[in-house]
Image (cartoon, helix red, strand yellow):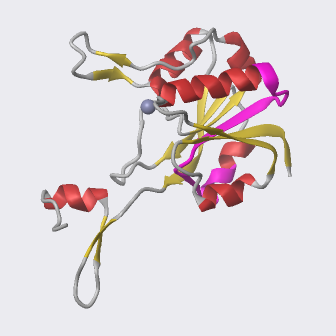
Amino acid sequence: MISNMCLVVLEGRKCNPFLEAWSQQFETRRIMRAFFPDHIACMRNRAFQWFRDECTQPWLVMCDDDIVPVDGTEELLRTDGDIVGARAWSRGGHESHQGSFTMAAVKVHRRVVEAIQPPWFAFSFSQDGLALNQCECVYFWKKAAAAGFAVVRAGKVGHRFPVTVVPGDPQPTFLFDADLRKAQRTPDP
Ligand SMILES: [Zn+2]
């Protein structure tokens, strides 16, 4: 049983069964559900605020509901640091946020959450509103770096996402997002 970390799962749809099973090892765990309409940056801010004000554990482990723990995930829990970010694989099959880190699966020490003034997370858009300039992960990373905290990358996690099933004889075809993009066509409905 892990007793010095609190696991918070940010649930938009439903916590996947792999993460659900993995979560059982945490003595303190909480599922924070999205309100509708909601935004991931707001959910992350609410998780941090709750952890700062109402939780007493030294560590916060925050995971999105589509994160799938794998063999290498334990390293995230074992590694010490201010902010420990797991390497995560996106639905396209490549590693996301290679130059920085993603907030999809992260471990943060209380000293960081308490030292940084909210908002901890925000998105920024181009002036014309047509492009996303910076996601909430990089926003937090820059704010933490400016406050003197370092990010360590340790451990890795998988991702669970929907698959498109195309009828076929005798076997249906399962198309992943990356395959769909490669094929550059929409399958027959
Ligand atoms: Zn991001």
Looking at the rendering, which quadrant does residue 49 occupy? top right
Side of 35 relative to 93 (left or right): right
Looking at the rendering, which quadrant does residue 24 occupy? bottom right
For image coordinates 77% across by 38% down, the residue present is 6
Q: In the displayed image of the protein, which residue is found farthest to the bottom?
A: 170
Looking at the rendering, which quadrant does residue 151 occupy? top right
Indicate the position of residue 133 as horizontal and vertical percent values.
31, 20
Indicate the position of residue 96 as horizontal and vertical percent values.
41, 41
The reply to whether the magenta stretch includes residue 64 is yes
For image coordinates 75% across by 18% down, the residue present is 111
Quadrant the C terminus occupies: bottom left
The reply to whether the magenta stretch includes residue 99 is no
Q: In this view, does 65 lie above or below 160?
A: above
83 or 126, nearer to the observer: 126
Indicate the position of residue 65 as horizontal and vertical percent values.
56, 47
Indicate the position of residue 153 as horizontal and vertical percent values.
57, 37
For image coordinates 61% across by 9% down, the residue present is 147
Q: In this view, does 52 lie above or below 20?
A: above
The residue range painted magenta reads 53-74
Counting labels gives 0
Side of 177 relative to 62 (left or right): left
Q: In this view, does 89 lie above or below 119?
A: below
Q: In the displayed image of the protein, which residue is found farthest to the front?
A: 36
Side of 124 relative to 127 (left or right): right
55 or 84, nearer to the observer: 55
For image coordinates 28% across by 80% down, the residue present is 172
Q: Quadrant of ligand 1?
A: top left
Q: Is residue 130 above or below residue 117?
A: below
